[in-house]
Image: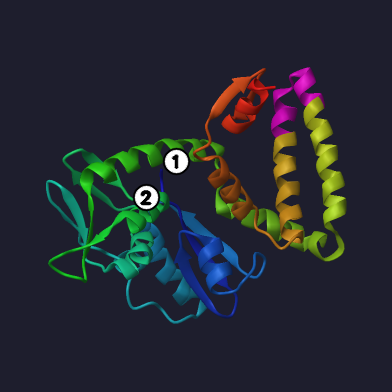
Amino acid sequence: MTETYYLYHIPGKKIGVTRDLNKRVTQTQGYKPGEYEVLDQSDDIDYISNREIELQQSYGYRKDHKLYKNLFKMKINVTEQTTTFPVPLTKLKGRLHDQVGLNWETEFGKIHLCPQLANWIAVNAHTSMYNSERSYVYNKALWEAFGEINSLESLVEQIDTRTWTFDNIRAWAKERGIYEKGNSHTQFVKLQEEAGELAKALLTKDRYEIKDAIGDMVVVLTNLANLEKLNIEDCIDSAYKEIANRKGKMINGTFVKDETYEKEKNI
């Protein structure tokens, strides 16, 4: 999965780069969508690093001393059985997230570090018995986790739920007063209207209208979540975590989780 870098601007404050606008700008720095803007984005870290310096100078901000791409370089050590990181367990998760996009080879194959794998490593790593400032994971377990996560990443990539898209939706809604003058009830009614449009499109097999209705429903859900002081990304993430390991069976075209299926079998 390609990692996208966002060049953001907080007017009067700074220009910076991040892979996660919600976490870096909203959660960490306190600026909500609409209070900052995305100036550029790219999956080329060399381009975005140089572009950041260029725009900092153009806008009159203090230039960073180091290029973004040089801030988080980590030298890892790979042996036949383990991958070792030059970071203690207490700091491993944060440093790994700074390294997203990093690749290395193990005897099982090439590892690509994504946010989900970074989380897995942080949970399953051990402190080195030789140096408490280093931590490691076993390559076999790492490879198996990478395989499972990579399959899920492909699905997420197809859905294309990129954070910047939701940020743009929220900025659009704020400019039009939806958050100031609207409310959750009106958005819920709007959602039902769009669901009706989707039902009609499904019945007529109108592919264009199906796509349009689904998109409209996502926009409404994004705004409904925001009015309830929630981020749609967190709602999606919470729902996925709930179903990630769920097992069940298809019954009459619907996936029924195990406990429901067993209950129905015994009736």
Question: x%, y% of residue 232?
Answer: 65, 53
- Left/right placement of residue 213 relative to residue 142 reads right
Q: Position of residue 47 (x, y in %)?
A: 38, 58
Examine the rendered structure and indicate whether residue 19 appears above or below residue 13.
Answer: above
Query: At 34% from the left edge and 37% from the top edge, which residue is drawn?
Result: 147
CA separation in Å, label 2 and label 1: 10 Å
Q: Pointer 2 and pointer 1: residues touching (CB < 8 Å)? A: no
| Secondary structure of the residue carrying numbered label 1 | helix
Q: Would you name the residue on which mark 1 appears?
A: 153
Q: Which residues are magenta?
A: 200-212
Q: Residue at x 60, y 32 (%)?
A: 259
According to the picture, the residue beneath numbered tag 2 turns out to be 117
Figure quadrant of residue 251: top right
Magenta stretch: helix, strand or loop mostly:
helix
In the image, residue 111 above or below residue 223: above
Give the class, few, some or many, for how many residues have Cα within 10 Å of label 2's Cα (few <14, many ≥20). Answer: many
Q: Where's the N terminus, which quadrant?
A: top left
Q: Residue at x 61, y 51 (%)?
A: 165
Taking the spot 44% from the left edge, 41% from the top edge, the residue there is 153
Q: Is residue 249 visible?
A: yes
Query: In the image, 236: left or right of 82?
Result: right
Q: Quadrant of residue 71?
A: bottom left
The reply to whether residue 100 is visible in this rendering is no
Front-lying residue, 166 or 62: 166
Q: Amino acid at mark 1?
A: Glu
- Residue 208 magenta: yes
Residue 93 appears at what percent x and percent y?
37, 63
Between residue 7 and residue 202, name the one nearer to us: 202
